[in-house]
Amino acid sequence: MNKCNRFRMSSFQIFDLMFNQRNIHELTCLFAVVLLLTCQCLADDGYEMDDFLKREYSLTKPYQGLGSSSSSYWDLMGNAMITTEHVRLTPDLQSRQGAVWSRAPCYLRDWELQVHFKIHGHGKKNLNGDGIALWYTKERMQTGPVFGNMNLFTGLGVFVDTYPNENKNHEKKYNPSTQRVFPYVSGMVGNGTLAYEHDRDGQSTELGGCTALVRNIPHDTFLLIRYTKNRLTIQIDVDGKQEWRDCLDLPGVRLPRGYFFGASSVTGDLSDNHDLISMKLYQLTVERSQEEEEEEELIPSVDNFEHLNKVEVQEEGMSGVQLFFTIVFSVIGVFVLGVVAVVMYGRWKENSRKRFY
Ligand SMILES: [Ca+2]
């Protein structure tokens, strides 16, 4: 939780305290604390304080009736199951797939999604998979190869990828400077035709990301996705320090309204427990000009996406041995050609001499 969220939670307690104080000095002190926290909050986030939790897009304990009751805001899919402590998208077993999808499309312009999750299992490092994906998409309740969800999706996908497929399949093709350390968190905006490349962990379509050691750790792990005024921010709190760390911050991200929130997960040969403890959606209040207010996106896009795409696939360079043999065979080739040419020239000369006699 960041400072503001902690404040948001504790503000009621503080006010409660204030009204119970009879001593004017204590009251003044408390008032100063409240004022300070409010100022810090506004300075840090740049938002008004009247952002609030939207129940219809949030998934919180107790998960009563989730997925089954008609009054539930969410649907469950595949192997996803509910306990009192979490929504388990997949258990630590091979070839499982599970998801939760919000039933109501979201028409908020500015929002912040806080996800409390836990990834844990018996597999050793790099012998586990595949991770969790969080979604804000036009489509819902689909199955496919992108963390259990469909490919060619329309909207936003944020991936907590715990297995480096790319390192396994393409190790020598990639420049080490662009190689990512896993588990890796990244974001992608799909327009319905852009494909997530599973074998490359979506590197060719990622908007940015960061390494996040999220697996088998004793403290709580959180991820935050904020979308406000076309700016997409991803932050993580996975180090047990109770503070947000920047992972991605990108302006020019255009997401239409009316899409669905969801989360999905998949296991293959390798597995993990992928648990969601909560997904909390806050509506954010930000100032907009009349022009910005009227702006309506139809297709998800990212300004200057081509320039963001930093993937440099290195030309497969020759190794020393390959170079040596190439030179040797080239020299032999040139020598053989030379000999053939000399012999043929000799014969031709002899033939023409014979004809002459
Ligand atoms: Ca992967």
Image (tube, helix red, strand yellow):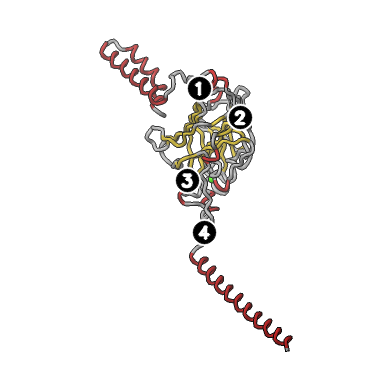
Q: Which residue is mark 2?
A: 75
**Do residues under tags 4 and 3 come within 8 Å of each other at their CB atoms?**
no
The image's mark for residue 283 is 1
Which residue: 52% across, 48% down?
A: 312
Q: Which residue is mark 3?
A: 182
Q: Earlier in the sequence, mark 2 or mark 4?
A: 2
- Nearer to us of marks 1 and 2 is 1
Q: Indicate the position of residue 134 as horizontal and vertical percent values.
A: 54, 34
Say left or right for 282 vs 142. Answer: left
Mark 1–mark 3 Cα distance, whole angstroms, equals 31 Å
Within 10 Å of the Cα at label 3, are there few (<14), some (14-19), or many (20+) other Cα atoms?
many
Badge 3 marks a residue whose secondary structure is loop
Mark 2–mark 4 Cα distance, whole angstroms, equals 50 Å
255 or 88: nearer the viewer: 255
The image's mark for residue 317 is 4
Mark 3–mark 2 Cα distance, whole angstroms, equals 30 Å
Mark 4–mark 3 Cα distance, whole angstroms, equals 26 Å
